[in-house]
Image: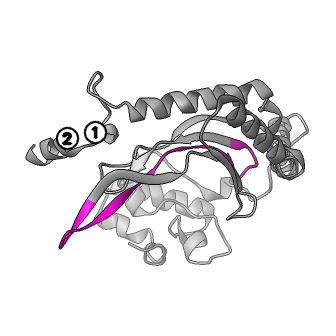
Amino acid sequence: MAFGEISRIAVYPIKSVVGSTEQNFFEKKAAEVGLLSTIFTCFAGGSTDCNGIVSFPFAMLLPSKLFFSLHTLTTDPMQLNTQDTQGLHRKVARYKEVLQNTLEYRKVWKSALKKNIKAQLHSLVEAGGLPAVVEEREDIHNLEAVVLTLGVAESGLGESLGSGLRRDLIKQNGSLVYQQLFNGKILVLINYPFIEKYGQPQPPKTIAIYRPEELKEPYFLRHVETFVSDITAWEDYDDDLVPEPNQRIGFKMNFEEEKG
């Protein structure tokens, strides 16, 4: 039942629903406040006089002696002192601080952090002899990324197209990504290798999320070492360990899943 419909229900139907004791009780209370109306009249019906009582739909659900009078309610705002709102002030201050941090983090990314990440990765690639390149991606403003990528290559697998034709399947060799988040922090993740039409891509692995000031020089070496270890494990895939569902690649696994 809509509010507008409820607001047109008066107290008089109590006579056909409750006994005379309850009826007399509610009529007496109604007389005390000077109004026979529903509790929704002033809210849904637009009445300016909110001195009403509970109408019969609520009278059936409430104890017979329970009575609510809207004339006890007030629309005056609560009187608050500094001590009452101390917690709210702290939360608002924290909220403003977080918004300001986002702006500051973005400034740091543009002025220094992006260049530092690229320099650190270039240095590690060169020192380790890793066959990788460092790229900068700026597809979306303030969601930029620096990527250490092993590139793409022919996988050695080929798709038969008929008539003696074959198309090589492309392999993404994996990447280490330093990605700006919406709040200016830096997400570091690993994208695993993937061969098209061969199993399902493994979800990226999140290493950590950092504030700009938290990205210290030793972390870059640790990140690259983790990246190389994880990519090597992917390339050396076998059945020594029970793989996660998204790591089950190959024709045998695909056949077993379809059979099941």
Name which residue type carries label 2: Met
Q: Residues within 10 Å of mark 1 (few under 14, many from 20)?
A: many
Quick one: SS at disc 1?
Answer: loop
Q: Residue at x 59, y 55 (%)?
A: 69
Is the N terminus in the top left, top right, bottom left or bottom right quadrant?
Answer: bottom left
Queried whether the magenta region covers residue 107, the answer comes back as no
Mark 1 belongs to which amino acid?
Arg
Which residue lies at the image location 80% right of the left edge and 36% below the top edge?
Answer: 87
Q: In the rendered image, is residue 184 in sight?
A: yes
Give left or right: position of 129 versus 202: right
Q: Nearer the viewer, residue 222 or 168?
A: 168
Mark pair 1, 2: CA separation: 6 Å
Segment tinted magenta in the rendering: 159-186
* Residue position marked by numbered label 1 in the rendering: 248
The answer to which quarter of the image holds residue 20 is bottom left
Q: Residue at x 68, y 74 (%)?
A: 48
Look at the image and tell me in which quarter the C terminus lies: top left
Question: x%, y% of residue 237?
Answer: 34, 31
Q: Is 177 contained in the magenta span?
A: yes
Whether tag 1 and tag 2 are in contact, CB under 8 A, the answer is yes
Q: Which residue is mark 2?
A: 253
Q: Residue furthest left?
A: 259
